[in-house]
Amino acid sequence: MGLALAALLLTACSPTTSDPAPAVTAPPTATPTETPVEEPAVTGIVVGGSEFTTVDSAGAVVDTVPYSSDPAAAIALLSGLFDAEPLVSAVPEEHCSPSFNRADWDGAVKLDTDFAWLPEGQLFVFGAYAPSHAGIDLTTSGGLAVGDDASELIASLPPTHVEMYEYEGVTQGMAAYEVEGGDFGPASYDAWGAQVRVKGSLVDGIVSPAIFLAASIC
């Protein structure tokens, strides 16, 4: 009995072990996220004498594309705006134009490259043949669009900036070279604005750079 009592006392005095406290896990640190900057929505293309620009609804310039820049980049930009690829074709030589290559968005916008009569340093011709395309307005720097009355523009220009054109003796229309500001200057693309093609009194098309009548009327 004495041995049993001693064993019981030793057991009672022995330290007891407990399970370790669970480790405290720190909450994950939140990683700050950058708020994406939205590009302004383009609502218009403005055709100038040496470049075209894309603008937003407030008229602020989004992109500037000189006619001396890479045509492939210009075609990519326009394809993105119109959400469509152009029809690309080779245009053969005609009575008033050498051969060239054309990117065509439904006949409303045309971009011509490899054009032998381009002014020095210019790589493509931009043409607008509708007041808008795919929700994008198409205007000159002076605000004219296809279908607008060009009488006021024509009346404001000197004779050097207005030409009648004809084919085989038949008058086809008129080309007026919109002036963007300043002196009229020499007959060169950087001093003249876009070429406004007129039939009757209405704008029939807008072409730039102003490569003059013989080179750009087809």
Image (spheres, rainbow, N blue to C red):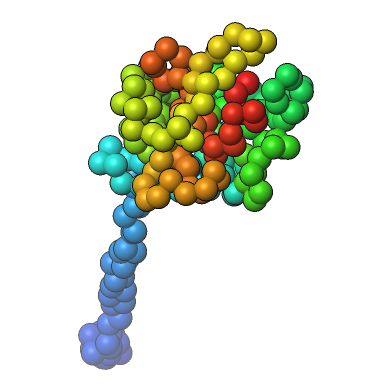
Placement of the C terminus among the 4 image quadrants: top right
Task: Decide: is 175 above or below 11.
Answer: above
Q: How many marks?
A: 0
Residue 71's spot in the image, x, y percent?
A: 62, 42
Q: Residue 74 sits in which quadrant?
A: top right
Residue nearer the viewer, 82 or 125: 125
Which residue is depicted at the point 51% across and 26% down?
A: 163
Task: Decide: is 155 above or below 53.
Answer: above
Residue nearer the viewer, 15 or 133: 133
Which residue is depicted at the point 31% across and 67% down?
A: 29
Placement of the N terminus among the 4 image quadrants: bottom left
Task: Decide: is 5 above or below 115.
Answer: below
Left or right of 166, for residue 32: left
Residue nearer the viewer, 71 or 181: 181
Residue nearer the viewer, 183 or 107: 183
Left or right of 15, for residue 133: right
Residue 72's spot in the image, x, y percent?
A: 63, 42
Which residue is depicted at the point 63% across and 10% down?
A: 169
- Whether residue 150 appears in this view of the structure is yes
Which residue is depicted at the point 32% across and 63% down?
A: 32
Left or right of 187, for residue 204: left
- Whether residue 1 appears in this view of the structure is no
Q: Residue 212 sits in which quadrant?
A: top right
Residue 179's spot in the image, x, y percent?
A: 41, 40
Residue 188's spot in the image, x, y percent?
A: 55, 45
